[in-house]
Image (cartoon, grey):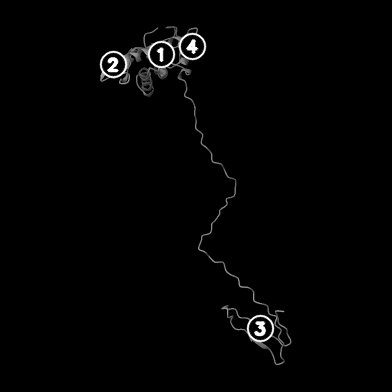
């Protein structure tokens, strides 16, 4: 048994003090012995080693409670432009200027220079407007088989006239005799609607610094904008 038994003497109480541990510990162990008592001493508890700091930073994790919300993707409106021919006519007199007019003139020029009539369709009078204007049995058929067919043929013809100068020709604009425009009323030329009409416009360009032009036979209006209806001869 690891315990130390000490018999008390009659003379009194013996106090035994143990000096410092030679291992360097500063602990002092005291054994008190009383007469007739038996004292048991246990081995000192094992020393506890304090955690050693390594100097490294602890990582910290932050937890956020709640329900995560997925990011939302903004939506973009992709509405199609309104066909002006589906809207009612107005009596606004067009002018040969403005962003739309300039874009249409340039489209016609590109169609002639490249020999591609499809490029010039925006400058031609809209079918939907033609249906509102003409008082004939089959306006859609007349529009496609006569007006559009002639328009495309005229563009091919003008491209042929440019010949090898097509790559060097430069558009300078379109001249429209606006002061000669007339307001056409229903009952004229098989019409049930009205529009402004002007004859004698020209598409102007230069080749190697020399001014030239193509005739544009007839323009008519829809809602304050000029459109081609006959590029070459009326037929």
Name the mark nearer the viewer: 3 or 4.
3
Residue 195, x across and y down, in percent: 41, 13
Q: Are circles 3 and 4 on residues that touch, CB within 8 Å?
A: no
Residue 145, x across and y down, in percent: 46, 10
Name the mark nearer the viewer: 2 or 3.
3
Name the mark nearer the viewer: 2 or 4.
2
Near-viewer residue (127 or 35):
35
Going from the N terminus, do you reach mark 2 or mark 4 first?
Answer: 4
Residue 150, picture quadrant: top left
The residue under label 1 is 152
Give the Cα separation between the discs numbered 2 and 4. 35 Å
Q: Does residue 46 sit above or below 85 in this rendering?
A: below
Q: Secondary structure at mark 2?
A: strand
Q: Residue 212: which numbered mark, if any?
A: 2
Give the Cα separation between the discs numbered 2 and 3. 129 Å
Q: Secondary structure at mark 1?
A: helix
Going from the N terminus, do you reach mark 3 or mark 4 first?
Answer: 3
Q: Secondary structure at mark 3?
A: strand
Horizontal side of 162 relative to 143 (left or right) equals: left
Residue 187, x across and y down, in percent: 44, 7
Residue 202, picture quadrant: top left
The residue under label 4 is 140
Q: Does residue 170 sit above or below 13 in this rendering?
A: above
Name the mark nearer the viewer: 1 or 4.
1
Q: Does residue 12 sit above or below 62 in this rendering?
A: below
The residue under label 3 is 31
């Amino acid at each position: 048994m690891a315990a130390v038994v000490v018999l008390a003497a009659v003379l009194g109480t013996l106090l035994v003090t143990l000096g410092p541990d030679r291992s360097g510990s500063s602990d002092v162990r005291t054994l008190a012995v009383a007469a007739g008592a038996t004292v048991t001493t246990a081995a000192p508890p094992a020393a506890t080693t304090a955690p050693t700091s390594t100097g490294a930073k602890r990582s910290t994790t932050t937890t956020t409670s709640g329900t995560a919300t997925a990011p939302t993707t903004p939506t973009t409106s992709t509405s199609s432009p309104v066909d002006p021919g589906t809207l009612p006519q107005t009596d606004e007199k067009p002018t040969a200027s403005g962003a739309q007019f300039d874009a249409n003139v340039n489209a016609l020029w590109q169609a002639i220079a490249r020999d591609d009539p499809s490029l010039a369709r925006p400058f031609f009078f809209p079918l939907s407007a033609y249906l509102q204007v003409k008082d004939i049995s089959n306006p859609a058929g007349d529009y496609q088989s006569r007006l559009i067919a002639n328009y495309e043929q005229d563009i091919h013809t003008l491209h042929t006239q440019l010949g090898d100068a097509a790559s060097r020709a430069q558009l300078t604009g379109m001249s429209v005799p606006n002061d000669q425009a007339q307001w056409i009323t229903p009952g004229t030329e098989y019409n049930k609607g009205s529009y402004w009409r002007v004859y004698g416009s020209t598409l102007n360009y230069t080749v190697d610094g020399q001014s030239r032009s193509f005739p544009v036979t007839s323009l008519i209006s829809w809602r304050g904008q000029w459109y081609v209806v006959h590029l070459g001869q009326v037929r």
